[in-house]
Image (spheres, rainbow, N blue to C red):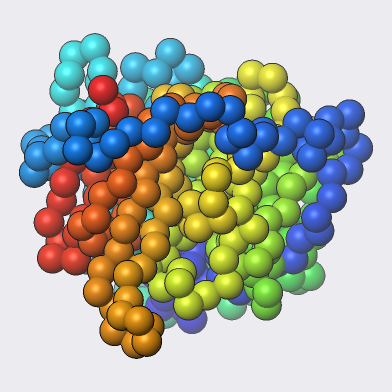
């Protein structure tokens, strides 16, 4: 346990910890009342022969060689991207005005774990003793749009046996403090607290068995977290005030299995696993929980088919959702797989309308679906990447 990397800890947390309930508490907004209609408006169905988006081998240059997470600033000038290879993740910022990338930040990880907003992004890490048997320090570092370090706190809590206790860290701009979620070494509860810039715990916000967020986000007087329960898997998007009161909460069950929470423009949503074996697993409930930071509302986005909820991702600017519905082609006896028909739908997130739709008969690989503001990239079974433009 002590020699596990940070990412293994995070993975175990995401998969095995916590429980959550499916209700909205202390809220004047009912999530079911503000759910989008299931794309009942007139759709623009595009015939493949005449309207397939421009397709070419994906640009492997600086921008398209990375996967977007989201913009770190409200003006959406600075896009946070990552690339994970082997046991390392590389983070960069793309400056949309100068059309260039920052110098990279390298982190020992295999999946991205950044929280971002208010012009910065925050990572946390750890240091081991010389023999590698104990964690000697856990710390969090904040970076600006140039990937320059602008803040750091150290000596964050450890478990009783000197292992990693921190689950997530976010910077709260309004109070110039950090919000830290960690496991209490005595009770085993997960605690959410404010820490000052010296790394001192100053105020406990919430405590319970269920807090297991890998990413947290702060928005003025709100804290947005992701909780997960296992057996069966249930994921909850929860919005707290700064005193720890639940304002909005939505649980997605039936093996939704969110891998993390992302910020896309003004929206914060749980990103589903996009697992390759979703055909043989219980499907998600066909819903995506979204928190609108501008309207201070939690609502439910429903694509046209349930399968699309397992294969969906938002554009970084929060305008569109790209979803894929996969239908397998088999022989009459249904024993031999012949191929797949992939229906790609592009939704307006704010209205739930399908703004573009096309069918592609080539075999898509389902992980990952990489979405930019102007298009998306998929891989086929031979790991060949293709780029599709929205326009």
Task: Tell me which residue sits at (28%, 28%) in the image.
Answer: 390
Position of 319 with respect to 211 (left or right) is left
**Vertical side of 21 occupied by 13: above or below:** below
- Does 341 appear above or below 266? below
Position above or below: 78 against 123: above
- Residue at 81% across / 34% down in the picture? 33
Of residue 294 and residue 367, the one placed in the foreground of this image is 367
Name which residue lies at 20% across and 57% down.
362
User: Residue 122 location in percent, x, y?
Assistant: 45, 39
- Asked where in the image residue 32 lies, by quadrant, the reply is top right
**Quick one: 257 or 16, which is closer to the camera?**
257
Is residue 275 in view from this perspective? yes
Q: Position of residue 290 (x, y in %)?
A: 62, 38
Query: Hey, which quadrant is residue 306 in on the image?
Result: bottom right
Please state which of residues 19 and 93 is positioned toward the viewer in this rendering.
19
**Image quadrant in which you'd find residue 169:** top right
- Vertical placement of residue 55 versus 10, above or below: above
Image quadrant containing the C terminus:
top left
Can residue 152 be seen from the camera position used here?
Answer: no
Asked if residue 185 lies left or right of residue 114, the reply is right
Q: For this view, does 378 lie left or right of residue 150?
A: left
């Amino acid at each position: 346990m002590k020699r596990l990397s940070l990412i293994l800890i995070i993975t175990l947390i995401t998969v095995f910890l916590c429980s959550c309930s499916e209700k909205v508490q202390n809220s004047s907004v009912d999530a079911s009342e503000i759910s989008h209609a299931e794309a009942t408006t007139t759709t623009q169905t595009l015939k493949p022969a005449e309207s397939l988006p421009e397709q070419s081998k994906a640009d492997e240059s600086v921008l398209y060689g990375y996967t977007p997470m989201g913009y770190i600033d409200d003006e959406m000038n600075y896009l946070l991207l990552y690339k994970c290879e082997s046991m390392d993740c590389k983070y960069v910022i793309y400056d949309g005005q100068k059309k260039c990338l920052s110098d990279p930040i390298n982190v020992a990880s295999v999946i991205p774990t950044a929280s971002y907003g208010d012009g910065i992004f925050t990572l946390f890490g750890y240091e081991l003793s010389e023999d590698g048997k104990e964690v000697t320090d856990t710390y969090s570092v904040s970076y600006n749009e140039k990937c320059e370090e602008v803040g750091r706190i150290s000596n964050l809590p450890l478990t009783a046996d000197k292992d990693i206790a921190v689950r997530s860290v976010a910077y709260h701009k309004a109070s110039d403090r950090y919000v830290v979620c960690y496991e209490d070494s005595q009770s085993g509860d997960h605690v959410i607290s404010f820490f000052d810039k010296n790394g001192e715990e100053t105020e406990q916000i919430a405590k319970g068995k269920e807090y297991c967020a890998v990413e947290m986000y702060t928005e003025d007087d709100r804290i947005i977290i992701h909780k997960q329960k296992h057996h069966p898997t249930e994921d909850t998007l929860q919005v707290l005030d700064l005193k720890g009161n639940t304002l909005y909460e939505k649980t997605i069950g039936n093996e939704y299995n969110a891998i993390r929470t992302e910020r896309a423009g003004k929206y914060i949503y749980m990103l589903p696993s996009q697992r390759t074996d979703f055909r043989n697993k219980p499907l998600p409930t066909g819903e995506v929980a979204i928190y609108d930071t501008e309207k201070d509302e939690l609502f439910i986005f429903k694509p046209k088919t349930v399968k699309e909820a397992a294969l969906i991702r938002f554009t970084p600017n929060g305008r569109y959702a790209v979803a894929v519905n996969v239908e397998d082609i088999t022989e009459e006896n249904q024993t031999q797989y012949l191929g797949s028909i992939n229906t790609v739908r592009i939704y307006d997130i704010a209205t739930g309308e399908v703004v573009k739709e096309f069918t592609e008969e080539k075999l898509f690989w389902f992980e990952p679906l990489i979405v930019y503001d102007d298009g998306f990239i998929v891989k086929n079974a031979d790991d060949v990447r293709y780029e599709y433009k929205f326009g």
